[in-house]
Image: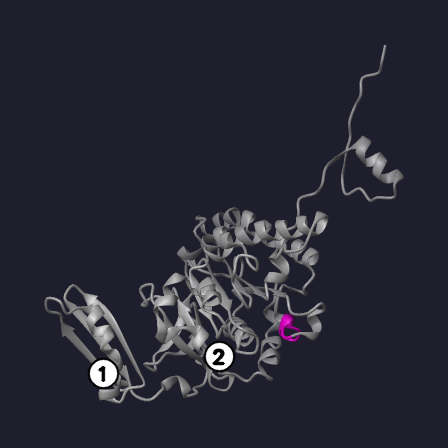
């Protein structure tokens, strides 16, 4: 093969995949391969792939998707094949890894890959900064319906908007196309695909050390993030949740475990890698993100699971090279395609007695309901 050696072996009694796997080390030396991977193709068939050199050290340009494709590009794997994440019927993506290895840049690249389509809108939660105008998403935010900073209460208001969009969308889809199934026709300008990008999402969902009203707000955020991950899939609202460590204290497991694609940049511990990729990563030494902490070599390299073709296994990806300085500005140049599609909130109806009490206290009354009372005899 262009990348090295591929061998398919027929097993014999007492020699199967376990025995071949144990021999992988000396096979790598004999074949002068950097990496050997062994997998079971079918009953009685074992495949050995030996990679000569290290293609993940080779940098290639980021490959932008074709207009007709609903795929989020990533980069190339050790076999020099381009890997992307199909969006159709996707429940969501979790992105993990230590700071400085490329999480935010990959999420910005995904936004950029779809930013020139009027049939896509974005909702951005920048948990890295109090004022999102001065963060990584500041300039790119001109293309988004909204951008919020790390304030959980502000995020709560916008998560409420997104949940309202999800609840109202079936009726809007039926009105437009006669069916509530979003992907049967796909994104349109009337009912666009909505990508919800949450960078450092733990700032909106971690209740550690909180009490009272603060804890109530975070718990409300957790419930709405869960709604996005569970109900958004078939309605064209897809959540991408990024945080350094996808453990249950940072992101609710009811959200995390419903996101079918896991992307993990280098981590310090295998526990952090397991939170993002599942328990199987503990048995896959070749793809262990905790063995990739060399920043000079592995910045921009991640491990992915849940992508079609992997069959529940893992693959390493070198993310395509991007213009970090120019990317946000390029996204901002598509701001003319931005539309706020959040449906209006239902008016609040209050009893007149409650309204009068609010007026005396100086509160505004959105809508009053008139009542009639029978006069006493």
Q: Residue furthest top?
A: 377
Outermost residue on the left side: it is: 13
Q: Which residues are magenta?
A: 136-142
Q: Earlier in the sequence, mark 1 or mark 2?
A: 1
In the image, residue 131 sits, relative to residue 223, either above or below, namely: below
Instruction: Say whether residue 305 is left or right of residue 337.
Output: left
* Screen quadrant of the N terminus: bottom left
Q: Which mark is residue 307?
A: none
| Residue at x-position 45% and y-position 85% | 61
- Percent x, y for residue 153? 70, 55
Residue where numbered disc 1 is placed: 27
Q: Secondary structure at mark 2?
A: loop
Q: Indicate whether residue 188 is drawn in magenta.
A: no
Can the viewer see residue 297?
Answer: yes
Badge 1 vs badge 2, beta-carbon distance below 8 Å: no
**Is residue 307 in view?**
no
x, y percentage for residue 297? 47, 86
Mark 2 — residue? Answer: 293
Observer-nearest of 144 and 228 = 228
Q: Is residue 184 above or below residue 74?
A: above
Query: Within 10 angstroms of label 1, few (less than 14), some, or many (20 or more) residues?
Result: some
Identify the image quadrant of residue 363.
top right
Q: Position of residue 79 (x, y in %)?
A: 32, 81
Nearer-the-camera pick, 209 or 204 = 209
- Quarter holding the C terminus? top right
**How many discs mark residues in the rendered view?**
2
- Under tag 1, what secondary structure? helix
């Amino acid at each position: 093969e262009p990348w090295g050696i591929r061998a398919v072996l027929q097993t014999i009694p007492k020699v199967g995949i376990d025995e071949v796997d144990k021999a992988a080390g000396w096979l790598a030396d004999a074949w002068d391969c950097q990496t050997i991977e062994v997998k079971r193709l079918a009953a009685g068939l074992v495949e050995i792939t030996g990679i000569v050199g290290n293609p993940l050290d080779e940098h290639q340009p980021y490959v932008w998707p074709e207009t007709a494709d609903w795929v989020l590009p990533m980069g190339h794997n050790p076999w020099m094949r381009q890997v992307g994440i199909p969006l159709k019927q996707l429940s969501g993506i979790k992105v993990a890894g230590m700071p400085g290895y490329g999480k935010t840049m990959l999420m910005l690249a995904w936004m950029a890959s779809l930013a020139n389509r009027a049939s896509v809108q974005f909702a951005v939660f920048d948990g890295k900064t109090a004022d999102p105008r001065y963060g990584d998403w500041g300039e790119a935010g001109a293309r988004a319906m909204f951008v919020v900073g790390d304030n959980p209460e502000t995020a709560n208001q916008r998560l409420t908007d997104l949940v309202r969009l999800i609840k109202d969308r079936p009726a809007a889809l039926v009105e437009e196309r006669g069916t509530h199934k979003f992907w049967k026709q796909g994104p349109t300008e009337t009912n666009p695909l909505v990508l919800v990008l949450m960078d450092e999402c733990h700032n909106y969902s971690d209740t550690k050390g909180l009490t009272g009203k603060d804890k109530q707000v975070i718990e409300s955020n957790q419930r709405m993030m869960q709604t996005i991950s569970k109900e958004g899939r078939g309605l064209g609202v897809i959540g991408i949740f990024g945080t350094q460590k996808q453990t249950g204290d940072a992101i609710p497991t009811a959200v995390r475990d419903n996101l079918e694609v896991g992307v993990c940049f280098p981590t310090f511990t295998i526990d952090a890698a397991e939170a993002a990729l599942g328990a199987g990563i503990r048995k896959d030494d070749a793809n262990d993100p905790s063995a990739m902490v060399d920043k000079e070599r592995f910045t921009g390299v991640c491990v992915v699971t849940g992508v079609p073709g992997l069959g529940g296994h893992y693959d390493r990806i070198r993310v395509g090279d991007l213009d970090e300085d120019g990317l946000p500005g390029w996204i901002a140049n598509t701001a003319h395609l931005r539309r706020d599609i959040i449906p209006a909130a239902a008016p609040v109806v209050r009893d007149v007695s409650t309204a009068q009490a609010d007026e005396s206290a100086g509160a505004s009354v959105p809508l009053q309901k008139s009542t009639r009372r029978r006069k006493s005899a």
